[in-house]
Image: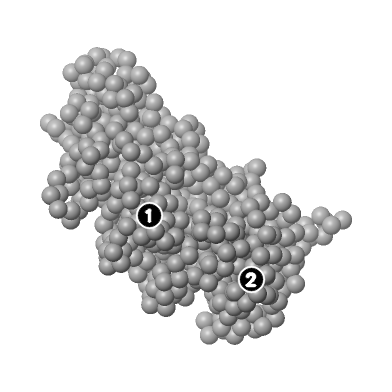
Amino acid sequence: MKNFVLALLMILLVACSQKGTESINESEYNDRVENLINKMTIDEKIGQMVQVDVLALTDENDLKNLAIGSVLSGGDSDPADISPSGWANLYDRLQGIALQSRLKIPIIYGIDAVHGNNNVYGAVIFPHNIGLGASGNEDLVKKVSEITATEIAGTGIDWTFAPCVAVPRNEKWGRTYEGFGESPDLVKKLGAASVKGFQGINLNSSTSVLACAKHYLGDGGTQNGIDQGNTILSEADMRQIHLQGYLTAIDAGVGSIMVSYSSWNGQKMHGSKYWITDVLKKELGFEGFVVSDWAGIDQLPGDFKSDIENSINAGLDMIMLPNNHREFIKLFKQLVTEGRIKEDRINDAVRRILTIKFKMGLFERPLTDRALTAQIGSKEHREVARQAVRESLVLLKNDAKVLPLSKENKKILVVGSAADDIGMQCGGWTVTWQGNTGKVQPGTTILQAIKSSVSSSSKVTFSADGNGAENADVIIAVIGETPYAEMKGDKNDLSISTKDANLISKVSASGKPIVTVLLSGRPMIIDKVLPQSSSFLAAWLPGTEGEGVADILFGDYSPKGKLSHSWPRSNNQIPINIGDANYDPLFAFGFGLTY
């Protein structure tokens, strides 16, 4: 009977309150927020400051009983059914429970949709940001984010933890590909474009989602490129390099900002009142809300209770709690009773969170617009992704003008297992947190794209290990990094793998021209393969639309991409960035050949 009543409630809510495009007069926000805050108990206020991972929500009734403000799906916290409708069903079920709370405050649901709605099977997977950075195309980045927002909204979810506006300054960092590039100016331009794409003209639009600029502050500048490490810089350099992306994101209206795990000169950002409250909220005038990273407050010195006290008083408004939300609420209440967290600080946090929820229209239209669900993975969306791929590719070498290749009367040998691997093309943060090789998503591999591009007079054969090179007119070798994400992607040696180097060496013995396509989340050390390659194409992590690579290989479009990172000659030259003294990279920032 209980399930029937809940199902009936859901049907009624879907019928009368889907997310739409109606807007609330901005002047009404403050009155509505203050009216709601005045009705809230301290328990309900604390609940709004809690974000719990869906897998930790062992009793979904906590959403209504504890007035939880937000749910997230972390990198591997997916429902059993990861189809678009499976995600939408999960969202609507949880939202329906939250709306049974005393004040009927809707939850906001967050996910790491960082290159398309990447945890949804069938979604379009775009190039990671390093590739979009190489495109340098603001309009394209905005369009990519618009499409991603539509594919997020089609699952009901309201909030993406993107864009990453880190300025990666050491390619050994495993999150390098999440940033647009090493230049603060590039990050400023493309980060703002992404925010505008996600949030649209009006957050209340059915196809808008809340953006989240991350990770505040200095995550791309840690010593030795160690994830979650220590950024050792003067305040002037911190502002000049790592703060810049936030300036334009705030100007673009970003509604949320995520704090970095990293430290600044030894102090954890999650406890920095100076950077969060004094700089971000007061000096820069950020009016949205600040969220922690996954269990980020746990890394502060002291016990969990002091972690709560220090992070909230530093200015965090919402705490991402993957495992222990009930303990958090209990200890938070103790801190209030003891006078160690003031209600004014709580009200400021709740005010920021509720304002965003009102601006998004969640109170009026809390459930999934199922008309959008059908658009996920559409042909139109894939065409934009294909454009993003071809504009992101950087041609580093083209001896004897081997590229573009002719589609006519050619025997083309494609080598390397990466040529026929969607997982390799997509990289990390694709269905799973760290990513995987193989058929992780529907899409077109580079091999498939090559085969469909040539005329009937040409013959394309595939050999993962390079056999048969002597019979080819030209060889296309696809090599690169296997998928990885944060922490596990940190690497001291960025040399091309021995397997890939041996493959290039083997096929080069044929004397035939070799076009090497590198799939990677960062510049690699290519001294063992570049001399043997007639042409060399940096393809980054292009995503599901391999046709974009073929578009460039066969000259349907000329390459436009320009390096968003300086390309080092050796591991010893890392880090190397534009503006360094004695700057002498293998390929300079901004380099890129064309036809």
Image quarter hosting the C terminus: top left
Residue closer to the observer: 360 or 187: 187
**Quadrant of the rendered image containing residue 541:** top left
Q: Residue at x 56, y 62 (%)?
A: 307
* Residue type pointed to by label 1: Asn
User: Can residue 110 be seen?
Assistant: no
Please provide percent x and percent y for residue 571. Answer: 25, 38
**How would you rate the neighbour count of disc 2 (Cα within 10 Å): few for under 14, some for 14-19, many for 20 or more?**
some
- How far apart, in angstroms, are the residues tagged by discs 1 and 2? 29 Å
Q: How is the image coloured?
A: one colour
Look at the image and tell me whether residue 26 can be seen.
yes
Q: Are marks 1 and 2 in contact (CB under 8 Å)?
A: no
Q: Position of residue 118 (x, y in %)?
A: 50, 47
Q: Residue at x 33, y 54 (%)?
A: 221
Q: Quadrant of residue 43?
A: bottom right
Tell me: 498 left or right of 111. left
Which sits in the foreground, 567 or 260?
A: 260
> For numbered disc 1, what is the local secondary structure?
strand
Residue lying at the far front in this picture: please name it: 302
Question: Amino acid type of disc 2?
Answer: Leu
Looking at marks 1 and 2 on the same chain, the residue that comes earlier in the sequence is marked by 1
Q: Residue at x 52, y 66 (%)?
A: 311
Q: Name the spot of residue 496 as percent of width and height, x first.
A: 30, 31
Q: Is residue 370 above or below residue 446?
A: below
Q: Nearer the viewer, residue 56 or 534?
A: 56
Task: Determine the secondary structure under disc 2.
Answer: helix
Density class for disc 1 (Cα within 10 Å; few <14, some 14-19, many ≥20) is many
* Quarter placement of the N terminus: bottom right
Q: Which residue is mark 2?
A: 335
Placement of 102 over or under 82, stated as above or below = below
Q: Which residue is mark 1?
A: 230
